[in-house]
Image (cartoon, rainbow, N blue to C red):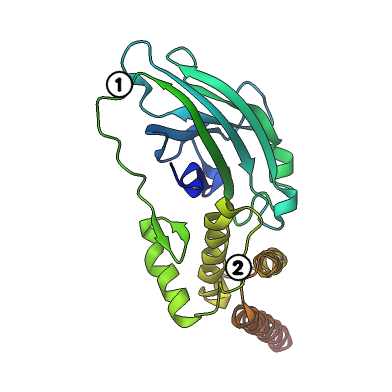
Amino acid sequence: MENQTDRRFTWVIKNFSSVKSNDTYSDEFIVGGCKWRFLAYTKGNNKPNHFSLYLAVADSKTLPLGWRRHAKFSLTIVNQFSDKLSQAKESENWFDQNSNDWGFSEIITIAKLNAGEGFMVNGEVIVAAKVDVLEVVGKSEEPSPVMETIYVDGIQVLPSQVKSVNRLFERHQDIASKFRPKYPFMKTAYMTVLLSLTEWLCQSPKEISKDDFADKDAALAYLTDAGFELGWLEKKLDEVKDKKKKEEACLARLQEMEQQLQ
């Protein structure tokens, strides 16, 4: 029997507003011995002003004639401020050569994504899928590679994230001791938010906008509510705020002196 966590996957769409192609695919993942991937329309699929999201059969062009996949699935737009505000839709469909993707053309409006309510943070939109494969007709002749992910302390992360996650756990051993998310498949999304926040804090104060602090405070509260022990991160955020204030005060003083000299 497949592990429950193996049927739940997340996808982080970085620089969402800058994605050039309207339709974009995620990397492949494996459920029920079948290859799947997300299909997103960042400007809507025949639905202007909407974000459209689908579950697609990744290898439909190489499957034998007459192939079919019966699956029950849910697609979620993750709210990075609060799990309770995440928006999910469910469906059950037969996938075949004529209909190799199913999903929702109006899963959320672009206006809501841009409203600063937690659905897009730092230009990143996180979507999640839970897939249950009920029946398979026509197997792929190619061996299915396992999705390229690695578990670190029970959290599924990408290979590119392993080094950063290991460093976090080495420096802060109790960071996830109370981490008990309501939805286990959201662990990857939480970790992505945490890594994004720590990377942002590593920037020079000159590269940080004061307007970003409200989003960072909300992201920190979101992670803390999920059970992460982040007192050290809160302290770091306060230090960055103080540096930014001092920098702005210094610049204001220099401008004042320049005006006096003139």
The residue carrying mark 2 is 179
Which quadrant would residue 237 be assigned to in this image? bottom right
Residue 97 higher or lower than 161, as above or below: above
Residue 88: give x, y in percent of width and height.
68, 39
* Picture quarter with the N terminus: top left
Dot 2 alpha-carbon crowd within 10 angstroms: few under 14, some 14 to 19, many 20 or more: some
| In this picture, residue 247 sits left or right of residue 173 | right
* Residue at x-position 49% and y-position 16%: 99
* Residue at x-position 70% and y-position 58%: 81
Residue 260: give x, y in percent of width and height.
73, 88
The residue carrying mark 1 is 62
Q: Amino acid at mark 2?
A: Phe
* Residue at x-position 46% and y-position 75%: 169
Judging from the image, what secondary structure is the residue with disc 2 in? loop
* Residue at x-position 56% and y-position 66%: 194
Q: Amino acid at mark 1?
A: Thr
N-terminal label among 1 and 2 = 1
Q: State the residue lying farthest toward the left.
A: 142
Determine if residue 117 is in view. no
Judging from the image, what secondary structure is the residue with disc 1 in? helix
Q: Nearer the viewer, mark 1 or mark 2?
A: 2
> Which label sits on residue 35?
none
Residue 66 higher or lower than 167, as above or below: above
Determine if residue 163 is in view. yes
Give 54 or 46, whichever is nearer the viewer.
54
Which quadrant would residue 49 be assigned to in this image? top right
Residue 106: give x, y in percent of width and height.
68, 29
* Picture quarter with the C terminus: bottom right
Residue 85: give x, y in percent of width and height.
74, 49
CA gap, disc 1 and disc 2: 41 Å
Dot 1 alpha-carbon crowd within 10 angstroms: few under 14, some 14 to 19, many 20 or more: few
